[in-house]
Image (spheres, coloured by chain):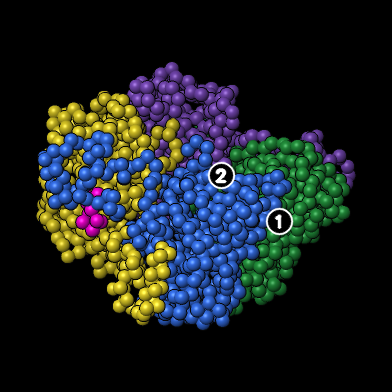
Chain colours: A blue, B green, C purple, D yellow
Amino acid sequence: MSASTASPVRLTALDAPGQPTPSPELEDLYRGFERELLVPLWTEIGDLMPASPRPQAVAHRWRWAGLVELARRSGALVPVGRGGERRAIALANPGLGGAPFATPTLWAAIQYLNPREDAPVHRHTQHAFRFVVEGEGVWTVVDGDPVAMRRGDFLLTPGWSFHGHHNQAEVPMAWLDGLDIPFVHYTGSTFFEFGPEEVNDRSTPARSRAERLWSHPGLRPVALPGSRPSSPIAAYRWEHTDAALADQLALEVEGHPGVVEPGHAAVRYTNPTTGGDVMPTIRAEMHRLRPGVRTATRREVGSAVWQVFDGAGRVRVGEQEWAVERGDLVVVPSWAPLTLTADTRLDLFRFADTPIFERLYADRVQLEGAPR
Amino acid sequence: MSASTASPVRLTALDAPGQPTPSPELEDLYRGFERELLVPLWTEIGDLMPASPRPQAVAHRWRWAGLVELARRSGALVPVGRGGERRAIALANPGLGGAPFATPTLWAAIQYLNPREDAPVHRHTQHAFRFVVEGEGVWTVVDGDPVAMRRGDFLLTPGWSFHGHHNQAEVPMAWLDGLDIPFVHYTGSTFFEFGPEEVNDRSTPARSRAERLWSHPGLRPVALPGSRPSSPIAAYRWEHTDAALADQLALEVEGHPGVVEPGHAAVRYTNPTTGGDVMPTIRAEMHRLRPGVRTATRREVGSAVWQVFDGAGRVRVGEQEWAVERGDLVVVPSWAPLTLTADTRLDLFRFADTPIFERLYADRVQLEGAPR
Amino acid sequence: MSASTASPVRLTALDAPGQPTPSPELEDLYRGFERELLVPLWTEIGDLMPASPRPQAVAHRWRWAGLVELARRSGALVPVGRGGERRAIALANPGLGGAPFATPTLWAAIQYLNPREDAPVHRHTQHAFRFVVEGEGVWTVVDGDPVAMRRGDFLLTPGWSFHGHHNQAEVPMAWLDGLDIPFVHYTGSTFFEFGPEEVNDRSTPARSRAERLWSHPGLRPVALPGSRPSSPIAAYRWEHTDAALADQLALEVEGHPGVVEPGHAAVRYTNPTTGGDVMPTIRAEMHRLRPGVRTATRREVGSAVWQVFDGAGRVRVGEQEWAVERGDLVVVPSWAPLTLTADTRLDLFRFADTPIFERLYADRVQLEGAPR
Amino acid sequence: MSASTASPVRLTALDAPGQPTPSPELEDLYRGFERELLVPLWTEIGDLMPASPRPQAVAHRWRWAGLVELARRSGALVPVGRGGERRAIALANPGLGGAPFATPTLWAAIQYLNPREDAPVHRHTQHAFRFVVEGEGVWTVVDGDPVAMRRGDFLLTPGWSFHGHHNQAEVPMAWLDGLDIPFVHYTGSTFFEFGPEEVNDRSTPARSRAERLWSHPGLRPVALPGSRPSSPIAAYRWEHTDAALADQLALEVEGHPGVVEPGHAAVRYTNPTTGGDVMPTIRAEMHRLRPGVRTATRREVGSAVWQVFDGAGRVRVGEQEWAVERGDLVVVPSWAPLTLTADTRLDLFRFADTPIFERLYADRVQLEGAPR
């Protein structure tokens, strides 16, 4: 992993509590460990087992304007085709040694498609979504079902679904891609297959077939029973998300429960066949803060990426605070204390790896001042 | 239970296969069984363990017009108040000895409220719903949340929710009540409590608070996590149900899956926190047949009640076939072969006890001609 | 169901609270209900929806000695063969109108097999078990696997398993059969098939193949993954049950948790593929009370049958108390308050329908003096 | 993570399919990515999304004799106490850059305790087990419950249980520790707390209290209901494991199912409250091969560690084959083809991270020659 845990056995550890007295014999023993591909716990335990998570990833903000500018330049220089597959540019967390990983588990990238351009069809075990902070005109075709992409929409490509994209507009389009690439890479569970060079259905319906079957509230097709690992809803449209957030804030005004905390509404995108998260490794939510609201400080096991959908405000993670506006992204490492402040009405999209921890009974949350 | 399984040990059974030779000693033995409150299996097994279900309930049709007429007369003679609780008149299956049970597990009744009339608040462990085949103007107040009732709506009152109704219209209103009263009665699991004499919130919003929190497709409030035994959606509105059925039939025309069988669309009402049935004991669905469609014949473990929401057609159960039109009800016993025929476009509401069998791994379905 | 809920609409109900004023028009209305196969709620609600369960079944005790005597006489007069299938004599709850039902959901019978006698092979959807209070020498062959029956053993025949029995001893053997026949009968979910006339494997191993695969604590065959509706353990042997109870009482002496209450140890038979109950509708347990112990009074939704395995004591249900000794059976209806008293060390086998209620979220328990 | 995925954007990737034409503008773009902490997908996709898993970890064998010798020398030089916590020496996979990780998710170490020595009490969210390949005399005290450690036993310390060890013997003892340290480290979900300096219960019972409550086959205490994330069985004793394996092989001889494949028996250690794996992240099994048996070649998503418990044979992973004997360890990376060959009767302990993948629906298995 990182240098800090690499052999040879570190001399610096010798000063740590509970360490053996240095001696030629000890040095000889440590060299024996190295020859035999062994590392003692006693020199590493401080790094491996701190009192609370000390992730290698760090908090960081990326400006959307900067991402778009580099994506635009890539649009001029980099073709989209078989081999490269996607014109996607990923956030590389400064704590993760240059790897294209927003966090140890999550990938976040801007993807960019020129007018009339196609991204070829493939599939992979990594779970993916798109979130559209601006623009429209691209259809992503998921297992043969064309799904329109429009501002505010959250779109799913669950693992092992064939998918390609095509831009039907006269202008480029950029959006946020979220995947569990780092987690799948780290755990060695990736499979990948090419599909046809071109998307097979270039029709441009306003609603996908998946939505027509599955996006009626509380209803499901009798002919399609059972639960599924991932949501069958290909697109969660902004009109519904916006209405749900507005309803929560209106209920708050009327004195009824629903919001997360005062002035803070939030909805989770769910799999209607289970009521749980949209995909096995990824949680996705939309939050809305009233102007002037400051959230309680919250720590959570697992990492997250936030993107401003609308409005302006500030994101504080530990000792750092960043001003953010439309499209800006902030990465929040595991257990880092997070506080959001809304300067205007502030809508924020969030995705996180929480389902991994919940399924393994390793989730924890701590609110400031609250007992753990 | 019924006379057919009652002691004294039946002489008729003596001719059945595997019976002992009659003798004074046998007669004496049988009288000994009676004295000791015992019954032998060998005389009863034919009734208790037939090759396939032979339910005591029978298929039957009730005309909505007749129900409404008797309900209207009840409206003039029978007050609604504490003690009687509800002006509800239940289907009494002719096979069940006069008990007010549509099937061994399900209750189906017409409930009727005069203008400006109230039904007092109470709660019970029985799960209940309302389905509105015509009219509007009543609000049912469920745990303090006023829920408007309008034609085509399906409304929930899960077990142990306080609920009362009040009619705000200048005309009476009648609707279908469905509950699991017979099942709860038989298994001895009923609890009941009175609430306030009057409903505490007489406001008349178009949407309930429950809908505002939970009826956004694929979205749920972050502040209300976890799964629940029953759906938190208080009302499933007709506009959504109608759109979902229309979408399925349109997809069929376009050559895509979604319908149950050719010309037959169907949606199931679900609990968005689990993806499963709305309440632990009750499944509810809406079906739509194109004009002229005849369904495959289907048997299913468990009993069901169908009500015509719109259109006209025929319902065949075994050797009997009934013409049906708006509001008419047909009860289908367990394992009875059912065929539906649409003379016009035919919309049918259905509720059934299937969740009981699925949760106990006792569900079975057989389609005509298909191997079991 | 019972006479008490049958139409014609009861005049006695007219005095109940909330009833309409008698009049010729009301009488005419009530006759109209009868013609149309309808029953009003307002006359029935007192019976259908009492404040807490008022089951039709009543508490009762059966003496094992009496059962054995009648079974012995049946052994001389009644053959065991195709048609009658089993020489089983069932408890008929005095509250259930003469039906061979211990409770509305549970069947309890003594089964009796003469030396060298066979019971033919069949299968049914009803779930069954055997509990052996005395004797040995019979093998029950479940899906081709011969399972020895010995005092203290609890043996499973999950629904739809082929099974027959054969007595290899020179003496008769009697045991307790428990099934969910009443529940399956009432809900109309029974299927039944004959198997071969004779059991196909007459070998007499001390351990069944099922035990050899599944009765190693905390271990399961890698080749047989997944969860199953019913336990694959064909026989739970007395030596293990006895040891588990002894361990709990020893831990109590040492000051550690494990017992249900002071002096009262209890183990539940479980499905090792889920950790839950042995079969979807039936819970089974063995209890041990130290001499002199009196349990807290307990009510529980659902009905149960208790059989004394060893020792002597008293069983109180509501206002009735019975002395009991080896083999005696007591039926406990839903929500009836139960207290056990041990005059000697007292071992009691218990089975109940609790899994039905738990799976439907309708379970409730109340301990005397504890808030519900 | 590894250098192979680190920025700066790699020139070598420029030759890969689908890459843009090198130019000064492209070079400038790539430098812009670096400045902005971005990495393009198109240069990395070959590493991140291969057709099937290409884990960084490699297969490797460690000789038990070598581990014991180094542990013995550590016993002379390294104290066990607060700070260092444990005298444990971990396998460092040669593909993982010197970190003390057997695989990306699993930790495997030899732990060593001198006569009369203590390891201090602590707890952590990491799940841990011990497997004893030889020796006895240590008690591990888990949440206050002393658990004897003996050859062949598999012992649990689920996450967040306090635990310490003490050696009551006159000779040292060494054993295998398995944990999910690398997974917890990578995902940032570790919590750690010190307990008392000394174990609070130094009694030396043959059976733990946990075993007395939970190690009776198919039985559980009625007083301890519900399911738990981890197994409550503190120790799975060799006598049971051995008997279960012997039973499977005897059943094979008799012509009955149970073994994994001809001559290959295997049992999985399970959580009796769920029927699933012992801990949320770790699967553990014991395998037995008859002399001369060669297993089918198998690939599986997820990594594993095997340790020979008894006998001698060969382990082939891909192109490498190692001779193994008692205590030797082999690490098998994700999706690496594994074949075992028994020269004598060969008993092998195995642990793996499979539960992570099963809970995330990412598990896959491939047998040689079988369609995937």
Residue B131 bears which disc, if any?
1
Labels 1, 2: one chain: no
* Residue B61 position in % (x across, y down): 70, 60
Q: Classify residue B9 by image quadrant.
A: top right
Q: Residue at x 78, y 35 (%)?
A: C16
Q: Residue at x 21, y 47 (%)?
A: A9
The majority secondary structure of the magenta stretch comes to loop
* Residue A176 shows in the view: yes
Q: Is residue C308 magenta?
A: no
Between marks 1 and 2, how big is the CA–CA gap?
A: 43 Å
Question: What kind of residue is marked 2?
Answer: Ala
How many tags in the picture? 2
- Disc 1, disc 2: CB below 8 Å? no
Between B84 and A221, which is closer to the camera in this rendering? A221
* Residue B338 shows in the view: no
Above or below for D359 versus A82: above
Q: Is residue B40 left or right of residue C19?
A: left
Q: Which residues are magenta?
A: D90-102
Q: Chain of mark 2?
A: A
Q: Residue at x 82, y 56 (%)?
A: B69
Classify the position of the C terminus of chain C by image quarter.
top right
Q: Secondary structure at mark 1?
A: strand
Above or below for A76 versus D335: below
* Residue B113 position in % (x across, y down): 81, 50
Above or below for D20 versus D346: below
Residue D156 bears which disc, if any?
none
Q: Is residue C109 left or right of residue A311?
A: left
Residue A296 bears which disc, if any?
2
Q: Chain of mark 1?
A: B
Question: What kind of residue is marked 1?
Answer: Phe
Q: Residue at x 18, y 42 (%)?
A: D133
Above or below for D113 versus B227: above
